[in-house]
Image (cartoon, grey):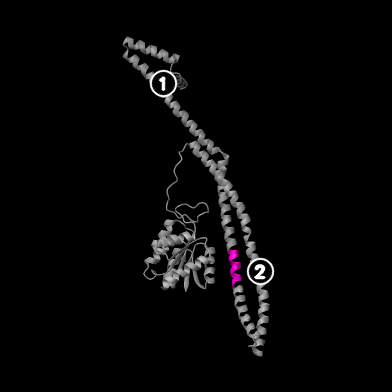
Amino acid sequence: MKILIVDDFSTMRRIIKNLLRDLGFTNTEEADDGTTALPMLQTGKFDLLVTDWNMPGMQGIDLLRAVRADEKLANLPVLMVTAEQKREQIIEAAQAGVNGYIVKPFTAQTLKEKLEKIFERVGA
Amino acid sequence: MNDAAQAEQHIIDEDNLARVRDLLECMERGDEEGAREIVDELANVRETTLYQEVGKLTRELHDAISAFGMDDRIANLAEHDIPDARERLNYVIAKTDEAANRTLTAIEESLPLCEKLESESGDLHARWQQFRRKEMSLDEFRELSRTLEAFLAEQNSNAGQVRAHLTDALMAQDFQDLTGQIIKRVITLVEEVEANLVNLIKVAGLPEREKPADDGSLAGPVVPGKETATTVSGQDEVDDLLSSLGF
C-alpha cells in the first residue's frame, strides 16, 4: 500500500505520515501541492491519495479533478483532509469524486475510520 | 469678492438698493442698454457668490485632507506599526512552525524506541512464561538470560533518550507565551486601525455598505463562534452531509 500525502505545510504532512505509519501504512511519499503531486501520481503507482484543499499552485480540488480526468488514475481513492468547512465546498468535492472528507483539526480515530471505509468500498 | 459675498448674505443692502433704483429709473426712461447693464451687474453678484462658495468648500476639503495627512498617528500606523505587525506575525508563524517541527522530531525519534520496547518486551514475556511453565531447556534459559540482560541495559539507555525527547517536546511549547503576547499586541493595533478607519468613514460621509458577496475564495478554518449557516461545525456534520449525498 503506497500513499501520497499532499499538503503545503510540512508539519501537517509529518503528522499524517506518522498517523498512517501508526496504522501500519509505512510506504508514504509527500508533495507540497497539486503541481508536484500530479506527476508523482502518474509515475509512482500509488494506492491512495491524501490531499489538503487550500494550497498555493494547484489546489486539492483541482488535483482531484485532474486525477479523475486521467484514465490511469481515475479509480485512485482520494481522501481530502482540509480546514475548508463550507457546505458547498464539501458538496463540490463530493461531486468531483472524492472518496472521503476529513475536516481539520481531526483525530487519529477519524483518519482510521475514513481509511477503513474507503478500503471497504474499494475492496467491495 | 468680499462685497459680493456680503451681498449674497444680505441681498438687501445699500449697493443693491441703489442698483435697483437705477434699474427702475432706466426702465422708466426706456434706457434699454442701461437697464441691461444693471441686470448683468446683479447677475454677476450672484455668480461671484457661487464661485466663492465653491472656493470655500474646496478649502474645507483641502484642510480636512491635510488634517488627515498630517495626523502623526495615522502616518505612523501606516509607515511603522503595520509593517511592524507584519514582521511580528511572520515571527509567530516562524515560532509555531519551529515548535511544531521540534515536537514532531521528538516524537518521531521516540516512537521507534517505544516500538522496540513493545516488541522486545512482548517476546521476552512469552519466553519468560515458557520458562515458568518449565518448558525451557538449560541452553534456552542461558540464551534467555543473556537476552534479558542486554534488553535491560538497552531499555535503561532508551528510557533516558525518551525522557530527553519528552523534555524537548515540553520545551518546544514555550512559543505559546511569546506568540500569545505578540498576537495580543497586534490585536490592539488592529483595534486602533479600525477606530481610525471608522473615523475616516465618518469624515468622508461614506454610507455604510452591505457586506460584499462571497468572492469565491476559500474560507479556511472556521473559528469557534464564527460558524455560519454555510459552514459545517465538525466531522459529524461533514459525515451527515456526505451520507445525505449517498456517500
Instruction: Decide: few, some or many residues near mark 2? Use Cα within 10 Å; few <14, some 14-19, many ≥20.
Output: few
Residue beneath the point at 62% across and 76% down? B117
Magenta span: B101-111
Residue shown at the point (41%, 59%) measured from the top left? A91
Residue where numbered disc 2 is placed: B163
The answer to the question of whether label 1 and label 2 lie on touching residues, with beta carbons closer than 8 A, is no
Q: Are marks 1 and 2 on the same chain?
A: yes
Question: Between marks 1 and 2, how big is the CA–CA gap?
Answer: 94 Å
Judge from the rendering whether residue B195 lies leftward or rightward of residue B27; answer left or right: right
In the rendered image, which quarter is residue B122 located in?
bottom right
> Looking at the picture, does residue B51 appear above or below residue B75?
above
Question: Would you place residue B100 above or below residue B19 in this image?
Answer: below
Relative side of B138 to B60, left or right? right
In the picture provided, is B218 more to the left or to the right than B101?
Answer: left
Q: Is residue A55 visible?
A: no
Amino acid, disc 2: Arg
Under circle 1, the secondary element is helix
Give me the residue at 46% from left, 29% from top.
Answer: B55
Q: Give B68 or B120, whichever is nearer the viewer.
A: B120
For mark 1, what is the residue?
Answer: B45
